[in-house]
Amino acid sequence: MAAFRKIYLALLRWIVIVCMFGMLFLIFANVVLRYAFNTGIYLSEGLSGLMYVWMTFVGALLVLYERGHIGVEMLVRRLPVPLRKLAFAVTHVVMLYVTGLLLTGSWQQMVINLHVVSPATRLPIALMYAAGVIFAAASALFLISQLIALLTGRLSDADLIVAAGEDEDETARLLADEVHK
C-alpha cells in the first residue's frame, strides 16, 4: 500500500509540474509570437485556463495528503488527547460535508456541460468541472480513510494535528525579536 501511495503522489506531482510548464510555455510562446510576429497561438488562453484549474485541484489534493493546509495548530496542541480526537473527527466530518457539496455540484455541472464545447479550445467545458469531481472523490476517500483510522485507533497523537501552522518555537523566537527591537 505504501508503494501505491508513493506512485500516486508522484503522479499527482507530475501532473502539477506538467500543467505549470505547459501554462508557462503556452503563455510565453504566445507573448513572443504576438510581439515578434504579430500572430499567436489560438489555443493558448483556453488551454492555459484548463491547465490552471487542473493544477489547482491536483495541488489541493497534494496539500491535503501531505497535511499542509492551514489550521489552528496552537490550539489543537494544547488540547488533551480525547478533545484532540474529537476536534479531528469534527473537522473531518465538516470537510466531508463540504467535499460532498463540491462533488454533487461539480458532477451536475460536468453533466450539464458535457456537450457544450469551448469556442477557444473546441474541448468540452465538462473537462473544467471534471477536475472538481476528481478532487472531491479523491479527497472524500482520503478523509473517510482518516476517520476510519481514527475510529480503529491507528492514528498516533501526532497524526491528530493535521495542519501546517506556526511552530511554537518559531513564534517564541519572533516575539523575542520584537521585544529586543
Image: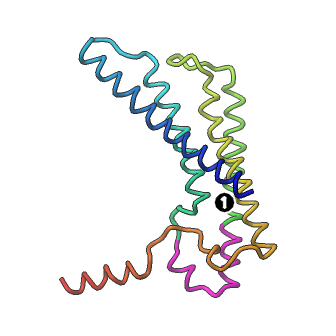
The N terminus: image quadrant = bottom right
Q: Residue 91 at x, y = what percent?
A: 65, 68
Residue at horizontal 61%, vertical 50%? 9
Compared across the picture, whether 36 is left or right of 65 comes to left
Q: Is residue 103 left or right of residue 151?
A: left
Q: Would you say the magenta stretch is mainly helix, strand or loop?
A: helix
Question: Dividing the picture into quarters, in which one does residue 127 lie?
Answer: top right
The residue at 68%/32% (across/down) is: 110
Q: Amino acid at mark 1?
A: Met
Dividing the picture into quarters, in which one does residue 144 lie? bottom right
Q: How many marks?
A: 1
Say which element carries label 1: helix
Residue at the spot 29% in from the left edge and 17% down from the top edge:
34
Give the residues in magenta: 72-91
Instruction: Kindly identify which residue carries mark 1.
Output: 95
x, y percentage for residue 41? Answer: 40, 17
Q: Residues within 10 Å of mark 1 (few under 14, many from 20)?
A: some
Of the 4 image quadrants, the one containing the C terminus is bottom left
Q: Residue at x 59, y 69 (%)?
A: 162
Magenta stretch: includes residue 168: no
Image coordinates of residue 94 in percent, x first then y, are: 68, 63
Q: In the picture provided, is 171 more to the left or to the right than 49?
A: left
**Looking at the picture, does residue 85 appear above or below residue 24?**
below
Task: Look at the picture and state if 154 lies above or below 52.
Answer: below
Farthest right residue in view: 152
Residue 11 horizontal/vertical position (percent): 61, 43
* Residue furthest left in the image: 181
